[in-house]
Image (cartoon, rainbow, N blue to C red):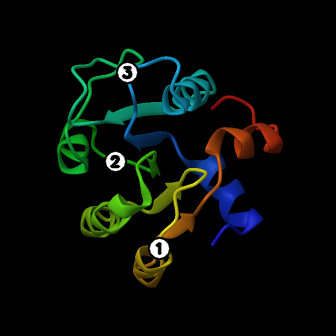
Amino acid sequence: MNEPETIKSMLTHAKTIAVVGLSENPERASYGVSHYMQKHGYRIVPVNPAAEGPILGEKVYANLDDAVAGVGQIDIVDVFRHSSFVPEIVKDVMRLKIPNLWLQEGVCHDEATGWAENDGIKVVSDRCIMRDHAALHLAAS
């Protein structure tokens, strides 16, 4: 988990990022980070059952099942939810065979990320996807 090669591979090869907990509020971190990633060529798929949408010009989905049904392949699930929600999200990621899981800064759950890694899912935990992307100086896709 959090290996530099894993981070670079995820960000280099991913095209579509489902953002669980993406807020409609432009002042929230989830919005700013997602907007940055979108500007750098990634398709952002908002997942938030409370949002009326659209967010960042994209249809909002209530859950990961609906997101996969709506857009097809998701490369990374990026989580902006409290750590207590991580086990259920990991179960969905495993069931849906999504290859990469990213838990934003402050989001951690060692047991659940262990399940994901044992299932072959690449995991980054307690890191900001935007900061790591910027640090790698990756060009837009």
Residue nearest the viewer, comparing 62 with 16: 62
Q: Any mark on residue 73, and which?
A: 2
Residue 80 in picture, x, y percent from top left: 45, 45
Residue 119 in picture, x, y percent from top left: 40, 80
* In the displayed structure image, the side of residue 35 where residue 49 appears, left or right: left
**Which residue: 67% across, 58% down?**
7
Disc 1, SS: helix
For disc 1, the neighbor class at 10 Å (few under 14, some 14 to 19, many from 20) is many
Foreground: disc 1 or disc 2: 1
Kindly identify the amino acid type of the residue bearing the numbered disc 2: Gln
Kindly identify the amino acid type of the residue bearing the numbered disc 3: Glu
Disc 2, SS: loop
Residue 97 in picture, x, y percent from top left: 32, 65
Q: Name the residue under label 3.
A: 24
Residue nearest the viewer, comparing 46 with 14: 46
**Which residue: 53% across, 19% down?**
27
Kindly identify the amino acid type of the residue bearing the numbered disc 1: Thr
